[in-house]
Amino acid sequence: MTRFPSVYVSHGSPMVILNNTAAKDFLSGYGRELGKPKAILIATAHFETRVPALTADAHPAMIYDFGGFPRALFEMTYPAPGDPVLAQRAAGLLGAAGMTAYPVEGRGYDHGTWVPLKLMYPDADIPVVQLSVQPQMSGAHHVAMGAALAPLRDEGVLVMGSGSMTHNLYELTRDDINGPAPDWVTRFGAWAHDAIEAGRTDDIAHWDERAPFARQNHPSPEHFLPLPFAMGAGGPGAKGRRVHTSCEYGVLMMDAYAFD
């Protein structure tokens, strides 16, 4: 059975699915590069709970958790099946690692899931389970979540985190998708890149204390936390490979990493 790397992708704005950008080109080809997994477990920045939760519907609905975008986005669907058995299996692994976790029903695919997956796996024929992030918890907690779920990689499951390498929407250059990134964005991205490539999991776990301009790039942490999750799922001492880098609207770094 194929063992997939754990991966982190930046989904940025929902417009990535409509705009012709380097990030869209990357995501549109990355599924073919990775190959087809048995199932996908994705920690998404847009699913926030106090303790880990996993979607357990057989046929999840759609969530359009954004506003002010073209109608075409609200008409898109991603009819991939869910995987209740995988949700239970993942909850069990998290429980065995000492974390309270539970499957939930009635929650559809948010755009942190369906936007990147619609580009990566457009046939929507791979079962998907979403995992929540816990913004009140540390990066170390999310590393531990990833480590607990790493065995799924040996079962043909693609373990993913979906967020945004930088995500300060207050500073968005809305009228210029190719606007230059300011120094505080590039310095944060460079710090994260160095830490990921060197396998400095402890630095990524404590990013909010150690990274330059951490809170300027992430006024709230939910879009960064899928990264320590993916790094934890890579295994002890995992070193990441950057598989894409670009920036949109000046402040949305669209970097993606694979952890073998």
Image (cartoon, rainbow, N blue to C red):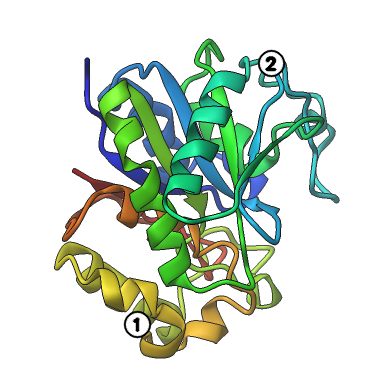
Task: Say which of marks 1 and 2 sits in front.
Answer: 2
Give the quarter of the figure containing the N terminus. top left
* Image position, residue 222 (x, y; %): 60, 64
**In this rendering, would 114 be left or right of 67?**
left
How far apart, in angstroms, are the residues tagged by discs 1 and 2? 43 Å
Q: Is residue 107 above or below residue 207?
A: above
Q: Residue at x 62, y 62 (%)?
A: 134
User: Element at badge 2?
Assistant: loop
Q: Which residue is mark 2?
A: 58
Q: Is residue 56 above or below residue 235?
A: above
Q: Which residue is mark 1?
A: 187
* Image position, residue 107 (x, y; %): 78, 35
Q: Residue at x 64, y 74 (%)?
A: 220
Q: Residues within 10 Å of mark 1 (few under 14, many from 20)?
A: some
Image quadrant in which you'd find residue 176: bottom right
Q: Nearer the viewer, residue 105 or 110?
A: 105
Image quadrant in which you'd find residue 173: bottom right
Q: Is residue 163 above or below residue 203?
A: above
User: Element at badge 1?
Assistant: helix
* Image position, residue 65 (x, y; %): 79, 46
